[in-house]
Amino acid sequence: MAGGQGTRLHPLTRDRAKPAVPFGGKYRIVDFVLSNLVNSQIYSIYLLVQWRSQSLIEHLKDGWQFGRILHDHFIIPVPAQMRMGESWYQGTADAIFQNLNLIDDFKPDLVAVFGADHIYRMDIQQMIAFHVDRKASVTVATLPVALEEANQFGVLDVDSGLRVFGFDEKPEHPLPMPGAPGKCLASMGNYLFDPQVLRAALIEDSQDRNSHHDFGQNLIPGLIDRVPVYAYNFMTNRIRGDSEENLSYWRDVGTIDAYYEANMDLRDAKPHLNLYNPFWPLRTAYYNQPPAKFVFNEESRRGVSVHSVISEGCIISGGAVRNSILGRSVFVHSYSEIDDSVVMDYCSIGRHARIRRAIIDKNVHIAEGEVIGYDLEQDRKRFTVTDSGIVVIPKAPKRDGTFH
């Protein structure tokens, strides 16, 4: 599911779909769900796209093409085709309903409906084993959250065997999960379905004029009393090679602040999200670029990077980068300083520029002597600034005028 507008991530989603937003220097958000599926040996994947999808489709072309030997190994983007009428997708359930032909034609044993806009690692085969063991018709991936945070999520009420008997969207007074009085089970927006159950439910939902056509608000609550619906606890999921610090990491990067913090999670010596686990590789598009280079300037005593993630093709030429994430081919000129920031591909940071707590999108040139993040009132006159003080500079067009 990759069709949302991602308005809370604006201006990063001004010219692209949320799953296409760069993350961690060289990746896109969509790479996480696709890597989870492929690493879990699930190779038949349709990606439903709608909102400003060109960047996302080009990324799939560059990094996610299987060979053509096996007909059931594919990752295919599916634009909104208006097969059921003249409307765009009206909700998550409607997006699947408008593409029921894909399920009918493929005839799968199981349908996994996963969002493409979260940062996490998950062995989906473990969720499938749980689904099969419980003889479930529907399984919802869930994550324990503190009761005081429940009003941000859809919350499931379960019995001791994790069978669902209630679903409440953003409740004020949620029920705690069994054995954990201070926590409740929140939906991650990832589901497993018996294909026939899913098909019948989608057709019924499409005929309900009062429905929001949403899995969490309508489809799942409507199935709870009719078929076995279970909650899979993501905290039990294990990835080979991950340490205790990395287990059950999941971030909804739906806001600028959440996106910024998830990037910052990558900097530490023992990061909360480990990108270096060879047993669960994070795949992405490959670009033929040279290694990063650091040029020390004797006069400025700079040309260094500390506690940061620096991608290929970067040149740190007499500047200083601290506690930051740099995308591909960023040029940092002499005497400049970058602190606690995310700088995306092909940016140029001019001499004597000073940048702090900023997100700079692709292809941006920061002029010589520019100061960003030190006077937020001035920054608000030119850029987007969050309540927490993160400055966001939207991307500039490439030399050919496009915004990929």
Image (cartoon, helix red, strand yellow):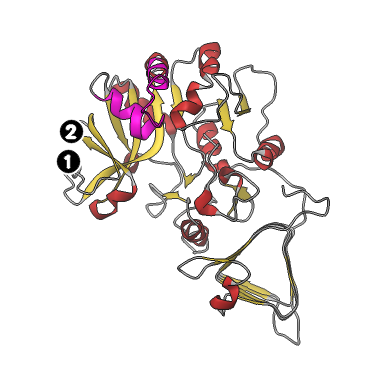
The boundaries of the magenta stretch are 200-224
Residue 336 in the image, given as x and y percentages of width and height: 69, 78
User: Please, what secondary structure does the residue beneath circle 2 have?
Assistant: loop
Q: What is the residue that sits farthest to the right in this orientation?
A: 400
Residue sitting at x 23%, y 49%:
172
Q: Which residue is mark 1?
A: 178
Vertical position of residue 351 compared to residue 261: above or below: below
User: Residue 135 at what x, y percent from top left?
Assistant: 29, 19
Q: Which of 293/375 is in front?
A: 375
Question: Which one is nearer the viewer's eye here, 379 or 264?
Answer: 379
Amino acid of disc 2: Asp
In the displayed structure, would residue 369 be above or below residue 214? below
Q: Residue at x 57, y 71 (%)?
A: 380
Quarter occupied by residue 303: bottom right
For label 1, the crowd category at 10 Å Cα-Cα, with few meaning under 14, some 14 to 19 and many 20 or more, is: some
| Residue 217 on the magenta segment | yes
Mark 2 = which residue? Answer: 159
Inspect the image, locate mark 1, and give the three-letter code of the amino acid beneath it: Pro
Give x and y (percent) for residue 369.
72, 80
Q: Is residue 139 visible?
A: no
Upstream in sequence: badge 1 or badge 2: 2
Q: Is residue 98 left or right of residue 402?
A: left
Q: Are marks 1 and 2 in contact (CB under 8 Å)?
A: yes
Report, in whole angstroms, how far the alpha carbon at label 1 lies from the one at label 2. Answer: 7 Å
- Majority secondary structure in the magenta region: helix
Q: Secondary structure at mark 1?
A: loop
